[in-house]
Each structure stands twice: as structure tokens, then as C-alpha cells.
Amino acid sequence: MKFVKMHGLGNDFVFFEDKNGMNKDFSQVAITLCDRHTGIGADGIIVIVPSNVADIRMRIINADGSEAEMCGNGIRCFAKYVYDNGFISKKEFTVETLAGIMKPKVIVGEDGKVSLVTINMGKPYMEREQIPMNGPEGKVVNEPLIIDGDTYYITSILMGVPHTMTYVKDVEKVDLLTLGPKFETNPVFPKKTNMNFVQVIDDHTIKVHTWERGAGATLACGTGSCACAVGSYLNGFTGRSVDVQLYLGTLHIEYNEDDGNVYMTGPAAVSFVGEWKE
């Protein structure tokens, strides 16, 4: 099986094509390929399959074998892959995901390859039942949640996948490997949650470290960056235009006032290509 290893600011994926993969179970394939000791190593696999409702379809399976609804960094890599490899010739196109139809717009460099990708990530859903999260009706903004006897004030949003954030003075001092899974699996989240620790730099810049549901600590999370930008606006920390600093670079997020959609712009890169001997 031929594959391409790609990453979006360090959030890495193994890509391959399967014309007959619309309904296949790729869970064990993902577990095998994503193992960083005995496999290729990645946060997830992304399978390019045909679509009956969009130009093309993206399936993303996390490193633990669970299938994700969406992935912001993954879809930027996906957009670069399908354009650079001739699956799509349009600079704006549609991608079917489990979170709905996404609309990438690629920016092409002088070499004819995609250099940046802007994704219309759609509207954030903020009602508790939409996230989903147990508790009374309404939005979850700056709400207390107790973890190991400590109170954290959280904001939760559905941005294709559920995201929760809490604001800290210094994200570098957060014990992500310990706290991340405790938020992810807290019973208040019936479908678990992705957990983001956010540091506000100024009124248009935040710094984010993310623990991803099904993948663990990752170097970048696109949907998380979008959710944190929206959450920072809802909490009054920033405006609608936010630069999100991640470990290896910055994503620009625009929470558009006119249409209510969230737009993410950032890079995607090929790490290497290879062949997996099954």
C-alpha cells in the first residue's frame, strides 16, 4: 500500500486512497499504522474516498481506531493532497466529512503546489445538548467543572467535534498528559471531549495546547484552534479575528460576523512518501 505522510503544524497523518473505502472498517489499520514504534507513526490516518454528495470525501480515523467527525489540520492536508495530486482541479471545492460538507480554498504557490489553505469550518454550535454535555439547557461559557478537587472554568463548543477549553496563565506549565485525559473522559461529556488549555496573549492572539479525544497530546489541532478563537470571543478576551499560536506555528482564525461561519487559514506539508508492506 502506497502512502503519503503529511502534517499540519505538526499534527500528522498517514494518507492513502481507497476507491472502495466508503464503508470499510479502518480501525485496526489506523492502530497499526499510527504506532510510533512499530508503524509509520501518526495522530491518525486519512483515507481519500469518492463522495456522492461532494467533490470528494475525507475519512479520518484516530490513532486509537475511533473514527472522527472532522479534523481541521487534517482537512488542510487533505485539500493540499487532492489538489497537488490532481484529484481536484478547482481552487475551491467541497469535501464530505462526518461533520458535514466542508469548503476548502487553496492558495497555490509559484511551483504550482498548494502553500496555504483556507477552510470554511462552518458555524460553531454552542447549546449544551449539541456539544453534547450533560446539564441544564443553554450555552457553556465560563462554567465551573471540578477535576480532582480543583475547580476549572470551562467553555465548551461543538466545532465539528466537541471541544472544551479552560484559560490559564501559562500553557507551558500545564501537565497536559495528566489533565487532558481527565477532562476527555469526564462523565459530564457523554461522547468525551477534546480538551484545550488556552493562554491569552493579547486581544487578537492566544496560545493553545490540546489533548485530542482518541489521539492524545498533539502538536496542533485545527478544530481546537477554531473553537478556542470562538470561545475567547465569547469570553470577551479577543475580537473575532484571532491568531492561534501552536507548537510549530500559527493558524489564523476568523469568526465571521456576517455569516456566523469560522474560517481557518494555515499551512500543510508533506513529510515523506512510502509503501507499507501489509
Image (cartoon, rainbow, N blue to C red):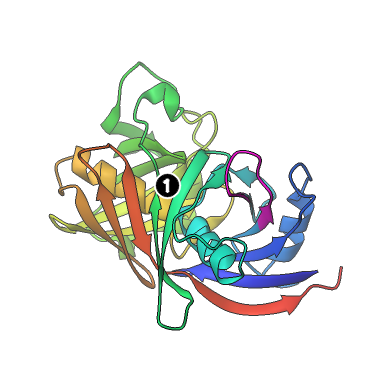
Quadrant into which the N terminus falls? bottom right
Q: Is residue 49 magenta?
A: yes
Is 33 on the left or on the right of 236, as rendered? right
| Vertical side of 27 occupied by 149: above or below | above
Q: Which residues are magenta?
A: 47-58
Q: Seen from this angle, which residue lies furthest top?
A: 136
Residue 58 screen position, x and y as percent: 61, 51
Is 251 on the left or on the right of 117, as rendered? left
Visible in this render: residue 278? yes
- Which residue is nearer to you in this view: 15 or 259? 259
Residue drawn at point x = 39 percent, y = 73 percent: 248
| Vertical side of 250 occupied by 120: above or below | above
Residue drawn at point x = 35 percent, y = 60 percent: 265
Q: How many numbered callouts?
A: 1
- Which residue is nearer to you in this view: 234 or 142? 234
| Residue 154, picture quadrant | top left
- Which residue is nearer to you in this view: 45 or 64? 45
| Vertical side of 225 occupied by 136: above or below | above
| Vertical side of 131 occupied by 148: above or below | below
Residue drawn at point x = 25 percent, y = 52 percent: 168
Residue 266 screen position, x and y as percent: 37, 65
Quadrant into which the C terminus falls? bottom right
| Residue 85, picture quadrant | bottom right
Q: Which residue is mark 1?
A: 195
